[in-house]
Image (cartoon, grey):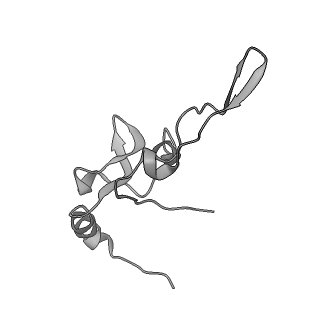
Amino acid sequence: MSKVILQSDFAKLIFILKKNYDIFAPQSKDGEVIFDSVTDATRVVLDYETTVLPPKIYFLPPEEELFKVTNGKVREIRIETIHSIWPEFKRFIGYCTA
């Protein structure tokens, strides 16, 4: 079941969500659209082609060490869980055209 919110009520939704969560959404900054923490709901844009960086930068590290080789021996690296890296409550707003 889908839910629809009027564009005129969108800023109010973000204001309500920000009481309990960090909200990230596409925003126009310096002529580019980026996902960033929302400080002003009026800067959120939903009619964009693509963002400079994908929102996955908030979920996955830019690089990750998987193993080490020392003196010809392979040692696995403990991979952190998402909760240990990112324990706070965050919500993302955007849309998908797929």
Q: Nearer the viewer, residue 28 or 40?
A: 40
50 vs 47, left or right, is right
**4 versus 79 height, above or below:** below
Task: Tell which of 88 and 43 is nearer to you.
Answer: 88
Give the residue at x 51% y 85%: 1
The residue at the far right in this view is: 72
| Residue 62 drawn above or below residue 47 | above
Decide which of 21, 9 is in the foreground and name it.
21
Q: Residue furthest top?
A: 71
Q: Specify whether 76 is left or right of 34.
A: right
Query: Residue drawn 50% across and 48% down?
Result: 59
Name the residue at the bottom extreme.
1
Q: Classify residue 34 by image quadrant.
A: top left
Give how far across and how far down residue 54 sits, in percent. 52, 44
- Residue 90 placement: quadrant: bottom left
In the drawing, does residue 69 fall left or right of residue 93?
A: right
Residue occupying the point 20% across, 63% down: 19
Q: Quadrant of the C terminus?
A: bottom right
Counting labels gives: 0
**Residue at 52%, 49% in the rendered image:** 81
| 92 over 10 or under it: above or below | above
| Image coordinates for residue 20, horizontal then vertical, percent | 24, 64
Spot occupied by residue 25 in the image (x, y as percentages of width and height): 38, 53
In the image, residue 69 sits, relative to residue 2, either above or below, namely above
Left-right relation of 66 to 40 = right
Q: Position of residue 61 (x, y in %)?
A: 52, 38
